[in-house]
Amino acid sequence: MLAQSALKRLGLVFAVSLALVLLVATVALAEPRIKTDGCRTYDTNRVDPIAFAQHLHNQFGNTSTTNQSTGTSLFNNKSTSCGVDWFTSAGWFPVERYESVSRTTVYYRAPGDQRQVKAIPTGLQLLGTDQKYNCTASGSGTFEDTPPYGCRGNWTTQVAFPDCWNQKSLEETTTVYSNNGRCPSTHPYRIPKITYLIQHDNADGKVPKPLVVSGGVDTWEPYTAMHADYFAANQSVFNDRLIALCLRNAPDSVTVAHSNCGTGP
């Protein structure tokens, strides 16, 4: 009887422990975010107001973007190719040869302690060089460091941006990547972590091998040269309301804190 009672207690302890593990795992996977869905590429050109690079770019977001654009000019022009009217930042990325883009989804997240996230200054320039790939249209599968050669359906390229700023200027050289939300002392100002999910139609049922990206006029480079640009100019509601509502004050246990944070996962 004593042995049986001990086994029951052991089983109860195990069940409670397992429940706690699952709860912690669920909380860890639920990450507050802001989602801008349905951003369409409105033009393919060589415009790049940050680096003036001659890559062939897919442009989305603020439709007034030129090489003369500033944060103020973008903010004052409220025309956007995205599904929400507050997203008036400019976004672009090099063309991946032979692959069309159906849409780009922009995520703003806050890994780690989201209470430390601050506003994104208008005019801040970001260069994202952390790219990964996924053999799903939604990005729900596993992300890999290499293109999904052999993928027959729609697939995605993900590019993540630095989220720590040194406040010395608005140029893209003043930001670095955090370590899961922890910024180095040299770059203490923490902004939301921005990620582009670039969705490809894959009409021919294959990913070009090798995958190459535009590297200049009539030149192509390996997929490792893939990157993206972000020129901050969102409307005031983003900094004044959405960052607090959807990130800073959102509980860890939710992904979508409010309908204004964007629908879906």
Image (spheres, rainbow, N blue to C red):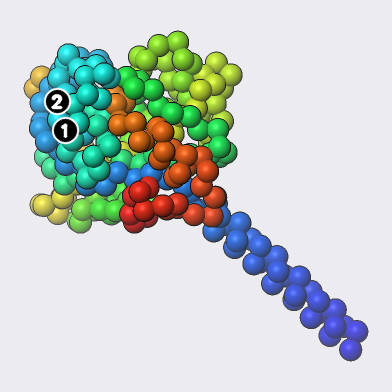
Residue at position x 34%, y 31% in the image: 236
Residue 166 as seen in the image, left or right of residue 238: right
Residue 197, given in percent of the width and then of the height, sits at 29, 43
Q: Residues within 10 Å of mark 1 (few under 14, many from 20)?
A: some
Q: Residue at x 34, y 45 (%)?
A: 35
Mark sitting on residue 79: 1
Q: Is residue 11 above or below residue 52?
A: below
Q: Which residue corresponds to mark 2?
A: 64
Residue at 61% across, 56% down: 24
Quadrant of the rendering where the N terminus is positioned: bottom right
Q: Amino acid at mark 2?
A: Ser
Question: Where in the figure is residue 223, as x and y percent of width and height?
Answer: 26, 33
Given residues 156 and 212, the one toward you in this image is 156
Q: Is residue 203 visible?
A: yes
Residue, far bottom: 1
Q: Position of residue 89 (x, y in %)?
A: 26, 29
Location of residue 113 with respect to 51 vertically, above or below: below
Whether 46 is drawn above or below 10: the answer is above
Which label was assigned to residue 43?
none
User: Which residue is painted at 43% across and 20% down in the image?
Assistant: 175
Q: Are marks 1 and 2 in contact (CB under 8 Å)?
A: yes
Depth order, front residue of 180/85: 85
Is residue 101 shown above or below 92?
below
Picture quadrant of residue 184: top right
SS for callout 2: loop
- Which quadrant, please, contains the C terminus? bottom left
Q: Secondary structure at mark 1?
A: loop
How many residues crowd around disc 2 within 10 Å: few (fewer than 14), some, or many (20 or more)? some
Q: CA distance from mark 1 to mark 2?
A: 7 Å
Residue 224 seen in render: no
Three-letter code, disc 1: Ser
